[in-house]
Amino acid sequence: MGYKVVVAGATGNVGREMLNILAERLFPADEIAALASRRSLGTEVGFGDKTLTTRDLDTFDFTGWDIALFAIGSDATKQYAPRAAAAGCLVIDNSSLYRYDSRIPLIVPEVNSEAITGYRNKMIIANPNCSTAQMVVALKPLHDRARIRRVVVSTYQSVSGSGKQAIDELWDQTKGVYVPGQDVAPSVYPKQIAFNVIPHIDAFLEDGQTREEWKMAAETRKIVDPAIEVTATCVRVPVFVGHSEAVNIEFEEFLDEDEARDILREAPGIMVIDKREAGGYVTPVECVGDFATFVSRIRQDTTVENGLNLWCVSDNLRKGAALNAVQIAELYGREILKKG
């Protein structure tokens, strides 16, 4: 049985990656529609060895389509997702619009696949924030063993998380450093991103944290366990693709670093690369294009009773966005088959 699949926002970084991953994973699609806004109408995008011409999102009729992967931002999603859902097309949304709605499941398939049954509430499933997705894949198997009490995480997030304009800004600013008279003023970011780091992602909230930091806490509690406390510092770094995270975990029970390493090696979606030598860890450059979430630098934190540190790296356009959405679609397909 094949599905009729829509990719909305097909010309953007995440939309193109969704098409790539659907093709790579041989998703059972009988028909694919690539949708875009009118300013991108007619743009050609790749799907495996095929070329698709984008169609108009504004006039598209979702009737008869099975699954729609949305990568169009919250404002457009608010307009078009209810239309698709009302037509009986399941929406898997990459924006933040529905993540915190108790009626809509927020899913990372390796972590809370059982939540898929909640799609019936609204015919909408939310995809988590990119920085949350990779972290909870690593947290869940450890939580099952020793119960996580608290997480302190510092992120090192690539510019691709802000879209193509941010990638261009980093590239242009980098060239400008070496070419006199070609300085590029910040536009996407409030400060220069080339050869710099910016401890500010998304808007500031009244308590001093940014919305990105708040998202990591709220989403981890919804996906893994509402009892877990999370405090985050989210930083934009001059890397094109690939998010990294330094994660400190405090457990209710003692968990030895060797046992943690073994647990993570057996966990779905995780690849452990952890040698205590130069280069014995994974960096963002090495994770680009890969499906896995890589974990390195696993070690005991002796400053607390039951503490562990680890380093977590993933391709944010894949596991942090497009891959997770496609995995949800695969999970939905299995749920439909199970229902008979």
Image (tube, rainbow, N blue to C red):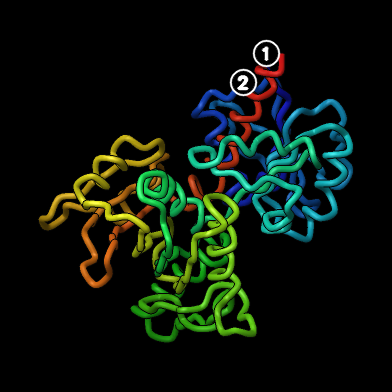
Residue depicted at 36% across the width and 54% down the height: 313
| Quadrant position of the N terminus in the picture | top right
Nearer-N-terminus badge (1/2): 1
The quadrant in which residue 301 appears is: bottom left
Asked whether 163 or 129 is in front, the reply is 129
Q: Is residue 17 visible?
A: no
- Element type where label 2 sits in the image: loop
Residue at numbered disc 1 = 1
Relative image position of residue 270 (x, y in whole percent): 36, 41
Q: Looking at the picture, how far across and down is residue 150, in whole percent?
A: 42, 65
Left or right: where 227 falls relative to 143: right
Tag 1: amino acid: Met
Q: Quadrant of the C terminus?
A: top right
Label 2 belongs to which residue?
28
Q: Residue at x 71, y 18 (%)?
A: 339
Q: Are marks 1 and 2 in contact (CB under 8 Å)?
A: yes
Q: Secondary structure beneath disc 1?
A: loop
Of residues 225 and 295, the one drawn nearer to the viewer in this rendering: 225
Q: How far across and how far down the image is residue 37, in percent?
A: 78, 51
Relative to residue 45, is residue 147 depicted above or below? Answer: below
The residue depicted at 65 percent of the width and 24 percent of the height is 335
Instruction: Name above or below for residue 280 compared with residue 153.
Output: above
Rendered position, 47 above or below 203? above
